[in-house]
Amino acid sequence: MKGLEIERKYLVRDTSFLREAIASVSIDQGYLHTETPTVRVRTRGEQGFLTIKGASDPSGLIRAEYEYPIPLEDAKALLALCTAGRLTKTRHLVPYQGHTWEVDVFHGELEGLILAELELDSPTTSFPLPPWIGEEVTGDPRYYNSYLATGKQ
């Protein structure tokens, strides 16, 4: 459980980040509810999670987030109930000048989409942008995973 998520999100220009990745994990996630608050079920490697996310602030930078570990078998069973939408992606952890970026390479119908996220301690935290970062899409609902999972794009 965290309580508050402060995050910036960007499109990724190319796959040069892969040379710097220090870890990668497969993620399968689905939504029991895609409207706010969203209710997400996720398997990340051999772990399961249930996450509830509230509405974003006007900037799209801050929102309530509560994430709970659940047994992997429960997560798999709940994923089967996720009629509101599902997606799969590979998450790469990429350090860059004191920060660790989460870079998601999407699969299936979202093949070709790559998004990078950086979680921050404060909305005013400054950070350098890696050369592979493209347009910022923080707060753009078209790039929320809950929207991407619906297949409406």
Image (tube, rainbow, N blue to C red):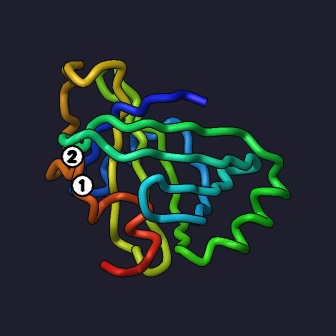
Mark 2 Cα within 10 Å, few/some/many (few <14, many 20+)?
some
Q: Is residue 60 above or below residue 84?
A: above
Would residue 114 appear left or right of 40 to someone viewing this image?
A: left
Q: Secondary structure at mark 1?
A: strand
Whether pointer 1 and pointer 2 mark residues with C-beta atoms closer than 8 Å, the reply is yes
Q: Which mark is residue 133?
A: 2
101 to 36, vertically: above or below? above
Q: Which of the marked residues, 1 or 2, is nearer the chain's N terminus? A: 1
Task: Give the residue type that dot 1 points to.
Answer: Leu
Instruction: Identify which amino acid the numbered label 2 is placed on.
Output: Ile
Rendering coords of residue 151 (x, y %): 41, 80
Q: Residue at x 36, y 19 (%)?
A: 121
Label disc, if present, on residue 11 of the rendered structure:
1
At horizontal 49% and vertical 56% (from top left) the residue drawn is 38
Tell me how far mark 1 sits from mark 2, CA to CA.
6 Å
Q: Nearer the viewer, residue 44 or 29?
A: 29
- Residue 31 vs 17, above or below: the answer is below
Q: Quadrant of the C terminus?
A: bottom left
What secondary structure is found at the residue carrying circle 2? strand
Residue, x 27% and y 37% (percent of image)? Answer: 61
Front-most of residues 34 and 85: 34
Q: Nearer the viewer, residue 45 or 95?
A: 45
Most foreground residue, 31 or 16: 31
In the image, is residue 6 above or below residue 26? above
Q: Quadrant of the N terminus?
A: top right
Q: Residues within 10 Å of mark 1 (few under 14, many from 20)?
A: many
Counting from the top left corner in percent of width and height, residue 24 is at 56, 47
Q: Which percent across, then down, holds residue 30?
A: 59, 65
